[in-house]
Amino acid sequence: MTQLKPILTHLDSIPSTPGKFKPDKSSPYNLYRLRFHPTLFPRFTLWSFFFIFFIVLLIFFSSPSNPTAGNSRRSLKNSLSPSPALGPNWERRVRASARPRSKTGFTVLVTGAAGFVGTHVSLGLKRRGDGVLGLDNFNQYYDVGLKKARQSLLERSGIMVVEGDINDAVLLRKLFDAVAFTHVMHMAAQAGVRYAMQNPGSYVHSNIAGFVSLLEACKLANPQPSIVWASSSSVYGLNSKVPFSEKDRTDQPASLYAATKKAGEEIAHTYNHIYGLSITGLRFFTVYGPWGRPDMAYFFFTKDILRGKEIKIFETSDHGSVARDFTYVDDVVKGCLGALDTAKKSTGSGGKKKGAAQLRIFNLGNTKPVPVGRLVSILEKLLKVKAKKKVIQMPRNGDVPFTHANITLAHTELGYKPTTDLEMGLKKFVKWYVSYYGSKKKKSSW
């Protein structure tokens, strides 16, 4: 199996204080000593010609062909950024993927479609007859091969996944021009709590700038789609009141990831208020299951137990258990579809609000926190292997000691009712894990 090695995105090494330009005194082009001597003039003229020619080319190729391209709705960066090649007949393929089977079906753009939850949501939508178009940038936060395998799974179900970034305004405009989406299921994000300490910029880029980029595309669409997006239970941060309710305070994030998700909720409120976008946020609680993320504890515990490697189990500073409200992915999908089905239409058109629009937030959890030690015991039983455990104090890396969802609101308004307990869900995960990685055993080690 390809080892999990997050590849960090580094910024170019640009000095914060540029050095002073010191003209070379020996150069014939030193502006302080330049004289239009007959022997220098031909070279100066040639240099000037190439400089002017370069400027003309730059202006020519950067000039927008669309007379409205200079509109303030588009930043200079977006107007110049190239969109990825969509391939031949891309528009026909995009429309075919997004076409619902019935007149009452939805037309849904799913961002992060090759991600864990995005894949399951896309399949759930397609199975019931909705049209689905996926979008994913296939970043290297974890094994891209796993993401490509999910993409293949989606394609076998008739779902096209466009490879591109939600920050690419040109690409988004092309997709919204090609398809009149009734809904957007925004699952794309930079995930993970601990990785934010290594690469904080990726969280701002994806979870804040990317969300704004998508909302900009939605606000300008006519008609505007309804939006359902993935927030996180991490927004509850250092809140000690349990179970966590949607009305509890969320102003004490314990990680940068949590802070970007909280920022997303505030940004959603702004676009709802100003532009009339119908927006529903879903706070996921530790989602697990087949096709999951390799950076999640249940996933790398399984890998390390099978390889005979030591696993680290965290405990609190007072030697208490760390617990999580583990939620099986199929239950989360039901909550996502319930949110989509009950989402009201956006009230704006072409960026202008015409009335008050729906704004909601829901917890999607299992309501039954389980100690991590219990998770390990279940995995030992299912894998028939004794784990090599080492209990250590939880580091100060953004993790919180427990999560516990109050799902009363989701149950009342969405009909959300989780039915999968941890042992049953882990059994399904282990079956998938052994099947998926067992078939690759000759090519790579576990």
Image (cartoon, helix red, strand yellow):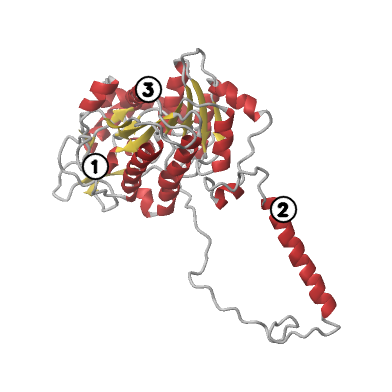
Which amino acid type corresponds to the residue marked 1 in the rendered image? Tyr
Give the residue number, with chain letter if any, for mark 2: 60
Q: Tell me how far mark 1 sits from mark 2, CA to CA.
A: 51 Å
Q: Can you say whether 161 is above or below 316 in the image?
A: above
Q: Quadrant of the C terminus?
A: top left
Q: In the image shown, does 78 or 291 lie closer to the viewer?
A: 78
**Where, by quadrant of the figure, is residue 425 drawn?**
top left
Q: Residues within 10 Å of mark 3 (few under 14, many from 20)?
A: some
Considering the numbered disc 3 on the image, is that residue within a helix, a strand or a loop? helix
Residue positioned 57% across, 52% down in the render = 76
Q: Position of residue 162 (x, y in %)?
A: 56, 33
Residue that numbered label 1 is attached to: 236
- Horizontal relation, residue 401 to residue 105: left or right: left
Task: Report if the CB atoms under discs 2 and 3 are less than 8 Å apart.
Answer: no
Amino acid on which the number 3 mark rests in the picture: Leu
Does 299 sit left or right of 182 as displayed?
left
Question: In the rendered image, which quarter is residue 339 located in?
Answer: top left
Vertical position of residue 54 compared to residue 184: above or below: below
Height in image: 11 above or below 305? below
Mark 2 surroundings: few (<14), some (14-19) or many (≥20) residues within 10 A: few
Marks 1 and 3, Cα distance to the nearest angstrom? 24 Å
